[in-house]
Amino acid sequence: MKKAIYPGSFDPITFGHQDMIERSAAIVDELIVGVLNNSEKNSLFSVEERVNMLKELTKDIPNVTVDSFDGLLVDYMKKSGATIIVRGLRAVTDFEYELQIAQTNHVEYPAVETIFLVTNLKYSYLSSSVVREFAAYGGDITKFVPPQFVDRIYRKYNIKK
Ligand code: PNS
């Protein structure tokens, strides 16, 4: 039974995240989408809002559950029984950071393996911070995020479209 976690901030969810969730759910038995509950980070959406949006997004994928976690990812994995971390690699710029996290997590919890999926070329430029920046100035974000979340994102910036 391969139980994996796709951890992240998901603030907000992008088409890149959706693609990663669908592709990783297809190669593991169970996938937990784990939203980091980082109280120090000034987030656009509360952790509850992000969890609910991810549940809405993944409701038709039977082997996906959504949860939030505090503190270290490896501690959450010990509790939940997940042993695989899935992360996406967009460009070489992601690599150094991801390698360091993967190696640290493996040292902290040797049962853990990190697997990397290469981001779909269509979304390789995309990040939550780009979406926030565009939305904040009223830019078009319809090419970046699933349609059901577009208005919710603009609303956070008091922008009516
Ligand atoms: O979407 P993000 O912000 O790139 O996700 C980063 C995340 C949540 C995967 C990473 O920050 C994380 O795992 N944080 C939890 C704290 C932790 O375990 N840190 C140790 C990594 S060396």
Image (tube, rainbow, N blue to C red):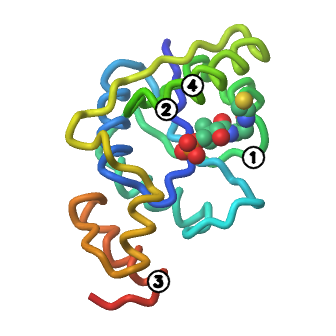
Q: Position of residue 16 (x, y in %)?
A: 33, 44
Q: Which of marks 1 and 3 is in front?
A: 3
Q: Earlier in the sequence, mark 1 or mark 2?
A: 1
Distance Cα–Cα, label 3 vs label 4: 33 Å
> Which residue lies under the disc numbered 2?
94
Tell me: residue 19, above or below residue 92.
Answer: below
Q: Please name the residue shown 50% across and 40% down the image.
A: 33
Q: Do the residues labelled 1 and 2 touch (CB within 8 Å)?
A: no
Distance Cα–Cα, label 2 vs label 3: 28 Å
Q: Do the residues labelled 2 and 3 touch (CB within 8 Å)?
A: no
Q: Are marks 4 and 2 in contact (CB under 8 Å)?
A: yes
Q: Which quarter shows the C terminus?
A: bottom left
Kind of residue at disc 1: Asp
Q: Nearer the viewer, mark 2 or mark 3?
A: 2
> Which residue lies under the disc numbered 4?
96
Distance Cα–Cα, label 1 vs label 3: 26 Å
Q: Position of residue 159 (x, y in %)?
A: 38, 88
Dot 2: element: helix
Dot 1: element: loop
Tell me: residue 17, above or below residue 14.
Answer: above
Q: Which of marks 1 and 4 is nearer the N terminus?
A: 1
Q: Do the residues labelled 3 and 4 touch (CB within 8 Å)?
A: no
Dot 4: element: helix
Distance Cα–Cα, label 4 vs label 2: 6 Å
Q: Residue 157 carries which label?
A: 3
Kind of residue at disc 4: Glu
Residue that lies at the very extreme toward the top in this rendered image: 110
Q: Which of marks 2 and 3 is nearer the N terminus?
A: 2
Distance Cα–Cα, label 1 vs label 2: 23 Å
Residue 76 in view, yes or no: no
Residue that lies at the very extreme toward the front in this rendered image: 93
Distance Cα–Cα, label 1 vs label 4: 24 Å
